[in-house]
Image (spheres, coloured by chain):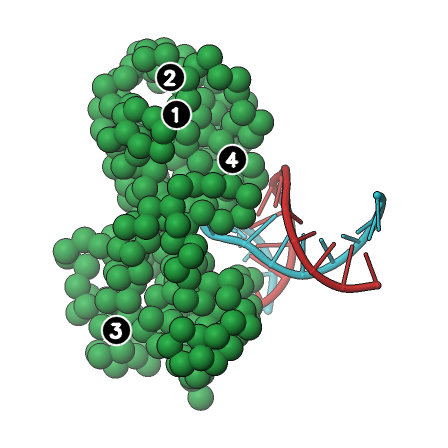
Chain colours: A green, B red, C cyan
DNA sequence: ACGAGCGCCTGTCGGC
DNA sequence: TGCCGACAGGCGCTCG
């Protein structure tokens, strides 16, 4: 599912309660069960079971698309990749079909990492930097300024779409929010990054932030067969709207493939580079 | 430095 | 109805 707004929505629900569950803060882990080996990136299954036991959930943070569950001694880091979700259910409920890893909490609740396509990953580490240290800036933080963004764009000579999807360049954008941000900024996905002038860079900077903020306010997007609570999918301007009218100019939305990803844009509002 | 192609997985949808 | 390919919110790897 998960781009920044969806991960942020899950983080808030786990921390403050929501999506039909209580907060997991302050709970101690009494039991753990790994149902798909490859879901656990680190450490070994045996060490994981031993180490996580009795640790208390102290806080929940997010870095890009990574969820950081701060425990007494370690951090449990989760990346949901394409189809992952984190759900809190009562322990009396049966384990769900695609649950890959779950933790039994002292409240009698179970925190389940459900992931149909098995691309998701979990790490239990003492130092989170080991996992998230290479990420680019957080787009919604104050120190991510238009000036810094413009300089970064000019430090590369890459097509905008693949560059924005590169998590070492900027953290948290995925296929949906990238297409939406480029449309809002009226920039074609194949424009070369260092050709943007300062006003175009600033437009892209503010579009990225606005789209992400809007996604968070709408509690993310729920698409495909999984309901996730958010309704941002009803407000897409280009994503999955191939052939439909651009909300700005009325021209049909076009779909091309860029870096093996479906890419949606308005051919009139987002003219191609020469 | 950069882009293309592929692998990892399961499921849905549309065309024939 | 059944089969088959295309496609899906991600990312790490190789190879030019």
Q: Earlier in the sequence, mark 3 or mark 4?
A: 4
Chain name for mark 4: A
**Among numbered discs 2 and 1, the one appearing first in the sequence:** 1
The answer for how far apart the CA atoms under marks 3 and 4 are is: 36 Å
What whole-number distance in Å separates the C-alpha atoms at marks 4 and 1? 14 Å
Q: Which residue is mark 4?
A: A115
Which residue is farthest bottom?
Answer: A274
Q: Which is more toward the observer, A186 or A273?
A: A186
Q: Are marks 3 and 2 in contact (CB under 8 Å)?
A: no
| Relative horizontal placement of residue A257, taking residue A134 as reference (left or right) | right
Q: Nearer the viewer, mark 1 or mark 3?
A: 1
Report the residue at 42% width, 22% height from top: A89
Tell me the SS state at disc 3. Answer: helix
Quick one: label 2, few (<14), some, or many (20+) residues within 10 Å?
some
Residue drawn at 55 percent across, 43 percent down: A225
Tell me which numbered mark, 2 or 4, is placed earlier along the sequence.
2
Q: Secondary structure at mark 1?
A: strand
* Residue A210 picture quarter: bottom left
Q: Is residue A185 above or below residue A16?
A: below
Q: Are marks 2 and 4 in contact (CB under 8 Å)?
A: no
Marks 3 and 2, the one that precedes in the sequence: 2
- The disc placed on residue A203 is 3
Q: Quadrant of the C terminus of chain A?
A: bottom left
Give the distance between the C-alpha atoms of the residues marked 2 and 1, in whole angstroms: 7 Å
Give the image location of residue A109, x and y in percent: 38, 17
Earlier in the chain: of badge 4 and badge 1, it is: 1
């Amino acid at each position: 599912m998960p781009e920044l707004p969806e991960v942020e929505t899950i983080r808030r629900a786990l921390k403050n309660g929501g999506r039909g569950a209580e907060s997991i803060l302050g709970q101690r882990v009494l039991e753990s069960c790994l149902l798909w080996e490859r879901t656990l990136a680190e450490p070994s299954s045996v060490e994981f079971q031993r180490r996580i036991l009795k640790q208390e959930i102290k806080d929940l943070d997010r870095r890009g698309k990574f969820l950081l569950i701060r425990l007494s001694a370690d951090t449990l880091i989760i990346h949901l990749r394409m189809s992952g979700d984190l759900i809190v259910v009562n322990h009396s409920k049966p384990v769900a079909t695609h649950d890959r890893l779950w933790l039994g909490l002292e409240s009698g609740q179970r925190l389940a990492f459900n992931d149909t396509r098995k691309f998701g990953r979990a790490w239990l580490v003492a130092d989170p930097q080991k996992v998230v240290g290479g990420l680019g800036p957080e787009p919604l933080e104050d120190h991510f300024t238009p000036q810094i963004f413009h300089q970064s764009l000019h430090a590369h000579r890459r097509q905008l779409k693949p560059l924005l999807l590169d998590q070492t360049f900027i953290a948290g954008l995925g296929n949906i929010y990238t297409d939406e941000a480029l449309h809002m900024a009226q920039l074609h996905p194949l424009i070369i990054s260092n050709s943007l002038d300062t006003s175009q860079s600033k437009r892209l900077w503010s579009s990225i932030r606005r789209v992400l903020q809007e996604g968070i306010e709408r509690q993310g997007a729920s698409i495909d067969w999984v309901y996730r609570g958010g309704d941002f999918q009803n407000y897409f301007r280009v994503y999955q709207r191939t052939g439909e009218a651009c909300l700005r100019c009325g021209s049909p939305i076009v779909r091309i493939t860029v870096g093996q990803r479906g890419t949606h844009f308005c051919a009139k509002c987002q003219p191609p580079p020469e």
